[in-house]
Amino acid sequence: MSLDLHPSDYSIFIVDSEENSRKYLQDNFQRWGFQVKAFVDGDKALEFMKTGELPHVMFSDVHVKGLSGVGLTKRVKEMSQDVEVVFMTSAPSIETALDALRLGVHDYLLKPFDKIEDVRKVIFHVCERVYLRLYNEYLSNELKIKNQEIRGLSNLADELTEVVDVSKTIEIGCRYLSNAFGKSDACFLQFIPKEMSLMVASRYPETLFGGAQSKLLIPKESTVDMKAVIEYFKNIEKDEHFSEMLVSASRMSSGGQEKKGWRAFPFVTRGLPRGVFVLHSPYWDDEIERPLAQRYVQALEKYFENALLHKKVFEMSVKDGLTGLYNVRAFRERLAQELLTAERIQHPLSFVFFDVDHFKKYNDTNGHPAGDFVLKTVADLLRKNFRSTDFIARYGGEEFCVIMPHTDLKSALTKAEEFRKVVEQHDFPHKEKQPLGKVSVSIGVSEFPSLAGNAERIVKIADEALYNAKKQSRNVVVCAEKDPNHIPSFESKHVSVSR
């Protein structure tokens, strides 16, 4: 089974006293995109993990200095059975192999490594196992949700178990934190990596801060890397700008009255900064109330990760991995839905079929990475140049399609021609090597109900129009031909012109 894994989601620890092999693994794991930490002996690795940061996978030499690989694995498994372990050794023995089996070690690698590809297969295979375990936990959670819904849900755990939406999880967290501290004001400042800022994303009560989207820029010195951001979160209460923002925002919902006494609780999952929960309490006992709030925040981490996992699994099922556009499965489902709606409200629906001209030649001449770049760029241009109400999908290979609700044939042809020019004028690398001296697209356009009466026909005649466009000269828009036997089910007087 092959899954579309994202290495950056996985934390890998390497425990190896041999500098060459340790650096060899670390360099390659980082090159593949994994989060990596390396240790020269078992004692240092264990000491670090006692702080609470455990890896998804640990690669340990059997004869590492300090605590041995076997001893380290025993201690790690006591902390969490979820940590996957791979043993490495240059001196294999039956006794060590049996120890590995008893401890539940995932694999056993012989050193020196003959082929890095063999190591790559092992790490990706074990990460697939981690992913599937998390996914199974998610499925089990779904079953639990259904059982609990029958009995009724009345507490935080029950309510969070129902949720598979990231923002909803945070909303519930704010509400329960507020209730736990006597209806105190609570909010969540979400971390925005692109802007290196924190923004109010959820609040309880909803009137808090008058609904303003207050934002706090993270100091430049704390944006070096994610560790620096996390460290800033831990000490954010010392930032005067943080206090000023909250005091200023509180005036909006309290009749001009300033509220002080805000407490912050970093929200970090899988070693990644997600944001900060903030609570207001004028009478705060740090020894009692801070640990209580932290336990609430820690309880939310599991459900937040479940929601992220659900989001990833859902996107994997309906999104194309390269372009991020919807895939054929999602397209077919959406087309069927849109046609039913168009029939019911008697509005036209247009369908636009694209094909990148001479794409195989571009790929063969410039290489697959360059070809992938073209496909991703075309996808970006589609997103920028079509409406948010249009449904854009990668149909397969170099083919793309757009469902345009409430759009008649004339408007769709105009829009298709506009987009053809956008692609033609875009400065793609190596475009001069193409037969037309540019990267271009051929386009076929069809419409419901005037040219086709069902999903199969609307796609088929657009595909035929696309084929004709490629026969003619390429880099043109061709309108689909109406079947002589087709009788439109209605004549719409209501059309929308695409932007």
Image (cartoon, grey):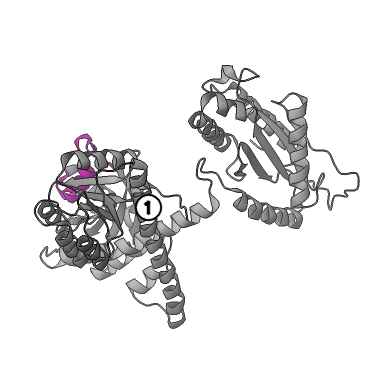
Could you say which quadrant of the image residue 288 lies in? bottom left
- Viewer-nearest residue: 271 or 110: 110
Is 218 magenta? The answer is yes
Is 217 on the left or on the right of 118, as rendered? left
Direction from residue 137 to residue 291 in the image, left or right: left
User: Can the viewer see residue 384?
Assistant: yes
Q: Which residue is at 18% across, 55% downward?
A: 62
Q: Residue placed at 35% from the left, 38% from the top?
A: 194
Helix, strand or loop status at disc 1: helix
Q: Residue at the bottom extreme? A: 151
Q: Does the stretch in magenta take in 216?
A: yes
Q: Which residue is mark 1?
A: 211
The C terminus: image quadrant: top right
Q: Quadrant of residue 472?
A: top right
Residue 439: quadrant of the picture = top right
Q: Nearer the viewer, residue 43 or 104?
A: 104
Residue depicted at x 51% and y 43%: 324
Q: Residues within 10 Å of mark 1 (few under 14, many from 20)?
A: some
Which three-letter amino acid code belongs to the residue tagged 1?
Answer: Gly
- Residue sitting at the far front: 94
Residues shaded magenta: 213-239
Place of residue 385 in the rendered image (x, y in percent of width and height, measured from the top left): 59, 34
Say whether residue 191 is left or right of residue 136: left
Q: Position of residue 220 (x, y in %)?
A: 22, 35
Q: What x and y, as percent, mark residue 214? A: 32, 46
